[in-house]
Image (tube, helix red, strand yellow):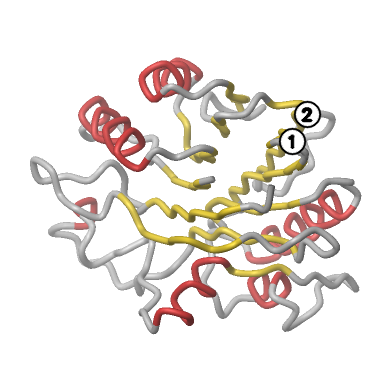
Amino acid sequence: MKIGTYNIWNDNRNYERRMDLLIDLINEKKIDVLGLQEVRDEAIVQRIKEECGFKDYFWKRYFYCQEGLAILSNYPMINRWTNWDDTEDIHNSTLMCVHFEMGDQTIAVMNVHLDDVLSTNREIEIVKAVQYMNNKDVNYKFLIGDFNTYPDSKVYRFLTASDSLNGENAEWIDIPEAWCIRKGEKLEPTLDFINNHRWYGQDVLYKPGRFDWIFMDDPYPSDTPKLRHFELIGTELTDGITPSDHYGVVIELEFER
């Protein structure tokens, strides 16, 4: 099963052409479950579903603007939730979770888009995300999305059991990191302020960083799936552009049957 996450940049610059490139890329990579951030409207989600052959999707508009989050899946969804279902107190950070069944396994995937300015907002909502997932009785749990922070942040250290937040603890596995350590490869940035076409000709002083993550909770007592592949997607220019100002992250796992 291939799981992916992609912030697709809700911006008018080359929007239609970028969405064409995005759809071509999804079809090329044959992604099974895909979380999207900065989704302009439901129309683009429906188009991706139809042109890429996904069987189901969940899109929901944020309560404060037209933009939203989406998850597309080759497996029918049996549960759908967002952190703004019943409240507007979400600290500019959005969480979306779905469940689906794959054979006799139940899997929960949470799509995350944390605040891009305040670290305190990110920290409050990532604790809520983990608390929500801790209460889910499923075989496998994944956190994917744009966490809007670097891997030396409190959010990352919290997720990887290196630090606590608000008295809470977590222990999630950074799947791309696990792959790169095994293969002796370098972890590349997913938000590249130097090489991505969005920033051409601009004096940007931010350092490139790996903001887009895929985590898996320790699945014990279920078997740990075999990690078959990891890659960044959307890094190559076509007609001078990429699908987004972020790069997508895709992992491939093999589950025991």
Picture coordinates of residue 229, whole percent (x, y): 44, 61
Tag 1 and tag 2, C-beta contact below 8 Å: yes
Residue flagged by tag 2: what amino acid is it?
Answer: Asn
Q: Circle 1 sits on which residue?
A: 99
Can you tell which quarter of the image residue 125 is in?
bottom right
What SS does tag 1 mark? Answer: strand
Gap between marks 1 and 2, in whole Å? 5 Å
Picture coordinates of residue 98, whole percent (x, y): 71, 35
Picture coordinates of residue 142, whole percent (x, y): 67, 53
Can you tell which quarter of the image residue 72 is in?
top right
Location of the N terminus by quadrant is top right
Looking at the picture, tell me which residue is in the foreground, 195 or 254. 254
Q: How many numbered badges does the structure rendering display?
A: 2
Looking at the picture, tell me which residue is in the foreground, 181 or 112. 181
* Disc 2 packing (10 Å; few <14; some 14–19; many ≥20): few
User: With 146 as the anchor, is 128 left or right in this view?
Assistant: right
What SS does tag 2 mark? Answer: strand
Picture coordinates of residue 92, whole percent (x, y): 65, 46
Can you tell which quarter of the image residue 165 is in?
bottom right
Residue depicted at x 79% and y 42%: 89
Q: Earlier in the sequence, mark 1 or mark 2?
A: 2
User: With 201 as the anchor, is 89 left or right in this view?
Assistant: right
Residue flagged by tag 1: what amino acid is it?
Answer: His
User: With 24 as the anchor, is 181 left or right in this view?
Assistant: right
Q: Circle 2 sits on which residue?
A: 79
Residue depicted at x 69% and y 47%: 257
